[in-house]
Image: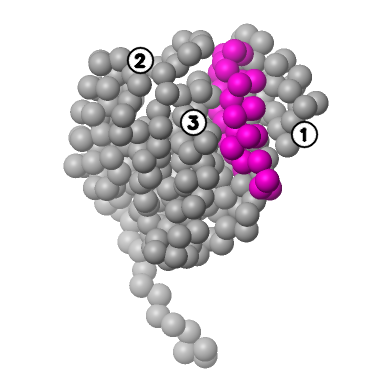
Amino acid sequence: MPKHAYHGRLSVVVPVKNEQDNVEPLVREIAAALSGTTFEILYVDDGSTDATQARLLALQAEFPMLRVIRHRVSCGQSRAVTTGVNAARYEWIATLDGDGQNDPADIPALLAELTNPAQPANLELLAGWRARRNDTFLRRLSSKIANGVRSRMLRDNTPDTGCGLKLFARETFLQLPNFDHMHRFLPALVMRNGGAVVSVLVRHRARERGTSKYGVHNRLWVGIVDLFGVAWLQRRVRLPLIEPDSDL
């Protein structure tokens, strides 16, 4: 069982920017998927210029577990996730992309693996694995290449680090190096910190509303720089082997 115990309480963190047409259907799906459990939903509005914030605030009357935090100026997806994790009330965090392509109905499957006694004792991250992508051919190809290069360099044993659907211990996340785009390297960073990572097959849906904020080019160049930065961090960590206390 994980060293960070799961007590049946979950904080769902959703970073968004200009997703006014996606917030209501996604909030409803999250609430339905987690019905009967103790949970909160934290939307972090990363400087939206459309009606995203107004629609989120309107939903709070119907969904009292919904909390809304706003960045006055866009700070990027990783910072939005960090803002949500810092504000979260519960010990375990699930993250979802705000575009509706992650299916909230997959969250219970991740939670089931979290409580599976067959999993490693140091399990600290469950990463969604989109084996069947509903994206354009170019995005699928670029993602496949990027995942292959990253896996060879970082040896993170994770086939799909770009999936926004993840489940992790809040305490673990707050111990990790924090930098722009760090959400793409969570498996490698968790392993660097001594935690185990398990990938779980999840669904991936086509975007039905709004437009993507990312393209091949604005992911490629920063991704290369970040990849070498994370590899540098990996080479400079030494995890101690702690001997049992002699007084025990």
Q: Label 2 amino acid?
A: Gly
Residue at x 34%, y 18% (from the top left corner) = 135
Q: Secondary structure at mark 1?
A: loop
Left or right of 32 on screen, residue 220 = left
Q: Could you say where residue 196 lies in the image, as x and y percent from the top left?
A: 38, 56
Q: Label 1 amino acid?
A: Pro
Marks 1 and 2, how far apart at CA: 35 Å
Upstream in sequence: badge 1 or badge 2: 1
Binning the other alpha carbons within 10 Å of mark 2 as few (below 14), some (14 to 19) or many (20 upward) gives: few
Upstream in sequence: badge 3 or badge 1: 1
Q: Secondary structure at mark 3?
A: loop
Q: Label 3 amino acid?
A: Asp
* Tag 3 residue: 103
Q: Which residues are magenta?
A: 11-38
Residue at x 29%, y 19% (from the top left corner) = 139
The front one of 29 and 186 is: 29
Left or right of 170 on screen, residue 9 = right
- Closer mark to the observer between disc 2 and disc 3: 3
* Tag 2 residue: 215
Binning the other alpha carbons within 10 Å of mark 1 as few (below 14), some (14 to 19) or many (20 upward) gives: few
